[in-house]
């Protein structure tokens, strides 16, 4: 009950601060298993994608969350687990552990996920080069739909290093799905996926 109430509070807050416009180009919001992948410039990116999805999709979609940051305090951990049902991922590989295992488990259980293939927040106008995780997931789950998304303006609401948000209109634009083509090399696929995200900036 507390998590649901806090979720509604967050939805209201993000809509007041950002307008929280969801724009669907190339695919409609649909209850099918998906991997949403987006640019990453703010901790609020997670909240923006979550708020942009219709309620029926939020319940089956789990955003990725950096374990080291989102488990630093009981409140952050509660928000990410109880409200967002997030998947924690270690940003640094430890020994032979595969950091993708939590995402693989989530997808294998039928959930959709939201990932940020840059791996960390960027500060430039364009996303950094995508890391290999998206390619690995596309290989392991060829039937899961890959949907690019561009989160616009959120870095100005809560820039890196800031904790007090500033009201500014923001949007999330969802694009046409892509797929890993037979025999496509990793870097070529990742560059194409990144280009699909950047192209949404102009829509």
Image: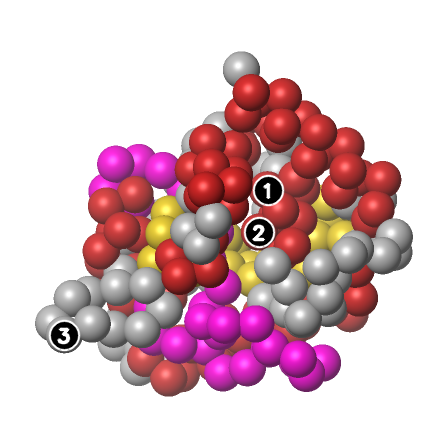
Q: Position of residue 112 (x, y in %)?
A: 41, 42
Q: Position of residue 172 (x, y in %)?
A: 70, 53
Q: Which mark is residue 46?
A: 2
Q: Is there CB contact under 8 Å for labels 2 and 1?
A: yes
Considering depth in this image, is 47 or 58 the residue closer to the camera?
Answer: 47
Q: Residue at x 36, y 69 (%)?
A: 91
- For label 3, count other residues whose C-alpha is less than 10 Å away and answer few (under 14), some (14-19) or many (20+): few
Residue under pointer 3: 95
Which circle, 2 or 3, is nearer the viewer?
A: 3
Considering depth in this image, is 70 or 116 the residue closer to the camera?
Answer: 70
In this picture, which residue range is highlighted in magenta?
107-133
- For label 2, count other residues whose C-alpha is less than 10 Å away and answer few (under 14), some (14-19) or many (20+): many
Residue 160 shown left or right of residue 69 in the figure? right
Q: Residue at x 71, y 59 (%)?
A: 163
Residue under pointer 1: 50
Residue 26 sits above or below residue 11 on the image: below
Magenta-colored stretch includes residue 116: yes
Q: Is residue 143 visible?
A: no
């Amino acid at each position: 009950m507390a998590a649901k109430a806090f979720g509604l509070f967050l939805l209201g807050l993000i809509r007041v601060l950002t307008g929280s416009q969801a724009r669907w180009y190339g695919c409609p919001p649909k209850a099918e298993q998906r991997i949403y992948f987006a640019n990453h410039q703010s901790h609020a990116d997670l909240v923006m994608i979550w708020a942009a999805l219709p309620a029926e999709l939020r319940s089956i979609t789990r955003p990725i969350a950096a374990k080291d940051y989102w488990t630093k305090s009981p409140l952050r951990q509660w928000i990410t687990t109880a409200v967002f049902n997030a998947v924690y991922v270690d940003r640094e590989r430890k020994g032979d552990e595969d950091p993708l295992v939590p995402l693989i488990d989530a997808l294998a259980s039928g959930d959709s996920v939201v990932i940020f293939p840059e791996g960390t927040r960027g500060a430039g106008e364009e996303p950094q080069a995508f890391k290999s995780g998206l390619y690995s997931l596309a290989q392991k789950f060829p039937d899961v739909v890959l949907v690019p998304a561009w989160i616009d303006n959120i870095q100005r609401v809560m820039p890196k290093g800031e904790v007090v948000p500033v009201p500014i209109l923001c949007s999330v634009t969802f694009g046409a799905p892509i797929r890993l083509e037979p025999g496509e090399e990793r870097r070529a696929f990742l560059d194409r996926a990144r280009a699909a995200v950047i192209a949404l900036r102009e829509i």
